[in-house]
Every structure is written in C-alpha cells, then in structure tokens.
Amino acid sequence: MFDLTNELQTLVQMYRTRADQSRGAVLAFASAKKGAGVSTCAQGFARLLAPNLVRGVWLFDLDFYINGQAANFSSTQAQHVYGQFGPPLDPTLQQKPFWRVSPQLVRNDGREVSSAWHLAMHQIGQHRLFVSKFRNQSLETGQSVHIIRAPSYWQRVRDAIDLAIIDVPSRDRSRTLLAIAPDVDGVVLVAEHGTNPNELKLLQHEVEAAGGNCLGVIFNASGELPQNSQQQSYQ
C-alpha cells in the first residue's frame, strides 16, 4: 500500500475544518481515465481519517466485479499490518440501497434474492474503518449491477457514520460517477501530474451538469511533486 500522506494532507485539513460533528459526509473519488490512482487516494484518505473519527469511515468500492479495496485489505500483508478482515456486515441501514442487481433471481421457495444482500461491509481489524465487498461470485449469467439515486439512503449514512468514501470507476470505463454525483457532498478528482487541464474541466462540467459538486483535483504521481502542486481547488 502506498503512502500518500503528503498528497492528501490538504484534503484532510479541508475535511477537518468543514466537518459537521453532528452530521457525516459522503465524498466520491473519481478520474477521467483509468490508472490515475483513484483507489490508492481513496484508501489513503480513509486510513488517514479513520483513527480520529468516533463513528467510523465506510469505504465503498464501486468496481463491483474486481473488489480491489477488499482484496488489498484482506491480503496477508495488509492483515498483518491493520488486522483481520472482518465478517460481512449489512450496510443498508434499513434503507433502499444505491445499487440494484437486475433481474432479481427467485429462490426455489419463491423468495426473491434482494439486491441489498450482494454488498457487505467488513471491519478492518479493530479500527473504525469498514470496507465494502460485492458478492460478485453470486451473480448469474445475464444479471448486472446498476447504480441508482438513493438520497434517503445516503442521508441515513450521514446520520450513522462520520464519513463515507466512494471509490468510483474511471469515467472512460463507466457512467457510475454521473449516477452517484448528485447524492454525494462532493467529488474529488484524481489525475496524473501533467494531465491536460481541459480534460479535467470537461469532467468537472459533466459532474456539475449531473447535479454534483467538484471539490478539486489531486495530482497523483509516483515521483515527488513540486511543493503545493498536489491539490488544486476549483473554488
């Protein structure tokens, strides 16, 4: 796992300054193109904040067919560092969730297999960090997963925890970002250092046209970045 403390520190400070102690926040991390480091940044942000948050952090991985976040935290190396990848927990909070599996299957006893069953949260060791895992192995041929508007669900999440972080597949792979953007408090874009600014502006405009709010962009690179260049605000 990569250490992105310096790259994320400005965003961490922004969150701590603006956080409402009585109400949680929902933030999405996304990029225009695959390979920008969205998952690494989302994971790093979650790990930085979780130790200081009482009600905890939920890290949602919306790349349902890969479950990269769960794979990382359930690896032998990660469990040695962070603790056991815990048993599945229900994250629906008695609300209609934001994912839908269609068509729904019917069991032999006539009961439908609920979309909610397919996704669970897992606590990481004894930390206040929980990571999602989608039961993709249970999908049958012809079934697919869709993101739907679920404002009541996300409001209930804000009431229950301190922070939800959503790791969103890149825009060149999926429309998931545009589907989730209206329901979150802000979208953090991630890009490689030197990315064409017009590409970022185009994605910003798409997010805003869908009803979302872009907080800014983190420039992620393998090497050292020029001082103060890691994060740029649109505001």
Image: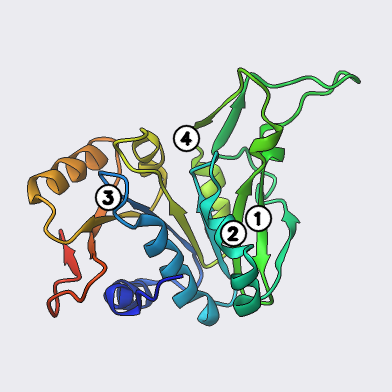
The image position of residue 143, as x and y in percent, is 61, 22
Query: Could you classify mark 2 by the number of other residues whose Cα lies within 10 Å: few (under 14), some (14-19), or many (20 or more)?
Result: many
What whole-number distance in Å separates the C-alpha atoms at marks 1 and 4? Answer: 20 Å
Q: Are there few (<14), some (14-19), or many (20+) residues within 10 Å of tag 1?
A: many
The answer to which quarter of the image holds residue 100 is top right
Which mark sits nearer the N-terminus, 1 or 4? 1
Give 82 or 46, whichever is nearer the viewer.
Answer: 82
Q: Mark 1 points at which residue?
A: 121
Mark sitting earlier along the chain (2/4): 2
Mark 3 vs mark 2: give the one in front: 2
**In whole angstroms, how far apart are the C-alphas of marks 2 and 4?**
21 Å
**Residue kind at label 4, given as amino acid type:** Arg
Residue at 16 percent of width and 65 percent of height: 232
Q: Mark 4 points at which residue?
A: 149
Is residue 160 something one can see in this rendering?
no
Q: Which of marks 1 and 2 is nearer the N terminus?
A: 1
Q: Which residue in the protein does label 3 denote?
A: 213
Q: Left or right: 73 with respect to 219?
A: right
Hey, what amino acid is under mark 3? Asn
Vertical relation: 67 (above or below) 122: above
